[in-house]
Amino acid sequence: MDATVAIRNERPAGQRAVAKRPLKPVAERVLIIGLDGATFDVLDPLLDAGYMPQFKRFMDGGVAGVLHSTQPPITPAAWTTFMTGKGPGRHGILDFEKYDAPTHTLTFNSTYEIREKTLWQLLSEKGLRVGSINVPMTYPPKPVNGFMISGFETPSINAQFAWPAELKEEILHVVPNYSYRTNWRRRALGGAGVLAENLDYIAHSFDQGLALTRYCGDKFGWDVLMVVFKLVDNLQHKAWKYLDPQTNGRYPAQREMAGRCFTRLDNVLGELFAYAERNAATVVIMSDHGHGSLDGKAQPNLLLSQWGYLSLGSGWEQAATRAAGWLHRLTKGRMTRFEQGNRGIERELAVDWTRTRACVMHAGIYGYLYINLKGRGPHGIVPPEDYDRLRDELIERLRAEQAAHPDGRVTPVFPQVHKTEELYGCSREANPGLPDLLLAPYPGLAVARKIRGGKAVRWCRGSRLEGTHREEGILAVGGPNVRCGARVDANIIDITPTVLAALGLRVPVDMEGQVIRQAFTVEPVVEQEPPLEKVAASAVEAYSEEDRRVLERRLSDLGYLE
């Protein structure tokens, strides 16, 4: 189709514009609502019990289904895949952390490391107005045609978290207690009172997201507007046993309190649905991954040590490493995992790199294993001609490892072990920073790089049951031209191509996702355009040492830096 369709958008005074769309749109505007970590395993029982009537009406009147996440199903990889329409092998983000083998260092990922253009950049270049609120992997915020308020990985309100820069002071005025803290408190004998405080803090974050959506949306105008409610994920990490139908019957009072927190979210969703209707917008509700119980923590570095691939120093050397950490903590404050002398591996481990062939360098949901390859890093010992053979050998041994659950079941510890270039369909030459192997644990397990005890899996006590990620997230779509009552099965990589096509825009040919055509009563016109230019990775470091301390505490509290 060659006809140009122009839609006039209502904007604040002085910002009236015409957004040109080369194809016929099926959506005038799009409001995207992110429920970080949301799963139908929790939401369906809440809907059935009447805790979320607004969301239930929305789902009944539109399209819903499972939204499959990335591998690994973790916040940075998944949200970046959503924003780019491309997988981790293309955009370069696999985890909160990144390991640089040539310098043997760990640091945090930021927008400087995203190698592909995001939805916000693409739409801005096409003249459409965008707004992004609390979307993970948007710190530091980049210039857009509209506004951006960075997400969960922002160190604090002292950072420059908004574009344009002057918006920061307005936000702090509109939301005086705005914060990036997760704030889950623990107190001995705190009981229901502490839980109520925690849940109220989370519910208040929902109200803040609504306030920012209305204020910034009205101030800047928008064609595509997004807000993410990150603390849905935190709630499930910390209060899983009160939400999981398999366990929450033991905690009726806490189950009711957690349910009421979701009702607070539902009230906010109702207000956002009304806001979308006033702006003739299609609504997309999505999560970056799902959730399930955290049953145990797999210890690949223990296995590597037992099998002779990872060599630890003597007991005295390990004790000295721990003592040095404690001395640093007493004299200079807590040592971070990034400081000199502890870079590249957990400070509690005294690794003998001269005798180590492989090590999981960072972990959380999955494990990221690197070969200690000669010529790649300062301590490399594995000859390049042994690289492929060693990887195949490790894959075979890791996949064969089994563990007995407390209930007697025996399952693989790592049912999937991937060569990352094969998983992502890319080359190692173009992606030298990729892990050599990606270790996917059995559902219910997270991966730890620490070594505690002598078993491959450290099982969690039922009384301390928390949540961890699953691959199955959620998708719900509603509004003009959306089918009623339809069910879809999609992937998070499909959302950006779908948004572009729905808006009457061509989809870059190098996007890896597919347009979810079956969501609409009028099928979007899908045409492709030339591939996007890659974004050059920047050597700029986004985080100071104090920023790293803040993020390490925040992420460790959720089990992401094990």
Image (cartoon, rainbow, N blue to C red):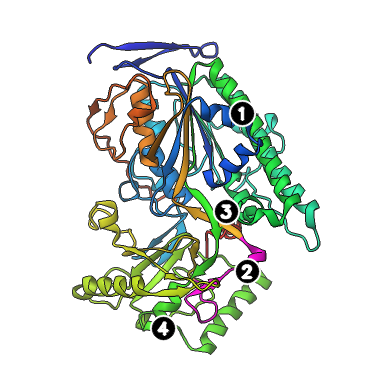
Q: Which mark is residue 438?
A: none
| Residue 344 at least partly seen | yes
* Magenta residues, start to end: 450-465
Q: Nearer the viewer, mark 4 or mark 2?
A: 2
Disc 1 or 3, which lies upstream in sequence?
1
**Mark 2 highlights which residue?**
461
Q: Is residue 371 left or right of residue 273?
A: left
Callout 4, which amino acid?
Gln
Main secondary-structure element of the magenta-colored stretch: loop
Q: Secondary structure at mark 2?
A: loop
**In this view, 170 is above or below 470:** above
Task: Please give the label number shown on residue 547.
Answer: 3
> Disc 4 vs disc 2: Cβ atoms closer than 8 Å?
no
Q: CA distance from mark 1 to mark 3?
A: 39 Å
Query: Which amino acid, mark 1?
Result: Gln
Front in this rendered view, residue 343 or 491: 491
Q: Residue at x 43, y 22 (%)?
A: 482
On residue 54, which mark appears?
1
Quarter of the rendering containing residue 407: bottom right
Q: Position of residue 215 (x, y in %)?
A: 62, 24
* Disc 2 residue type (three-letter): Arg
Alpha carbon separation for disc pair 3 and 2: 33 Å
| Residue 306 badge | 4
Judge from the rendering whether residue 12 lies leftward or rightward of residue 195; answer left or right. Answer: left
Q: Nearer the viewer, mark 1 or mark 3?
A: 1
Looking at the image, tell me whether mark 2 or mark 1 is earlier in sequence order: 1
Residue 315 within the segment the image draws in magenta: no
